[in-house]
Amino acid sequence: MKKLILKIMSEKVEGLLRHVLTFLGGYLVTSGVIDESILMEVVGAITTIVGFAWSFISKDKEVSE
């Protein structure tokens, strides 16, 4: 049951993060601060890193329990 809750929370956190990054990135693009292609690369990189870190942390918790 705990694994299911962690999986659901992980998906929700990642989804929320993507939406926040897209919103902020959209603001930066319309302000002329960054280019749209840079936005896509940065959002992709951040979500990949966060997903990897979340996976690593959740697996580490499973081992210690």
Image: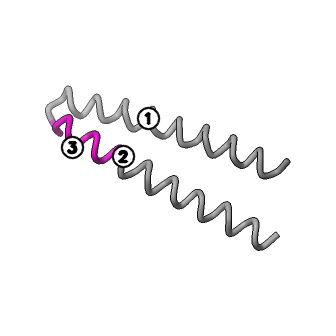
First in sequence, mark 1 or 3: give its number.
Answer: 1
Left or right: 52 as drawn, with respect to 23: right
Left or right: 62 as drawn, with respect to 46: right
Residue picked out by circle 1:
20
Q: Amino acid at mark 1?
A: Val
First in sequence, mark 1 or 2: give its number.
Answer: 1
Mark 2 falls on what kind of element? helix
Residue 28 included in the magenta stretch of the image: no
Q: Residue at x 45, y 32 (%)?
A: 19
Distance of label 1 from label 3 (alpha carbons): 16 Å
Q: Which stretch appears magenta?
A: 33-43
User: Which part of the image, by quadrant, shows the C terminus?
Assistant: bottom right
- The quarter of the picture where residue 43 lies is top left
Residue picked out by circle 3:
38
Left or right: 49 as drawn, with respect to 6: left
Residue found farthest to the right? 1
Residue 41 versus residue 15 in the image, above or below: below
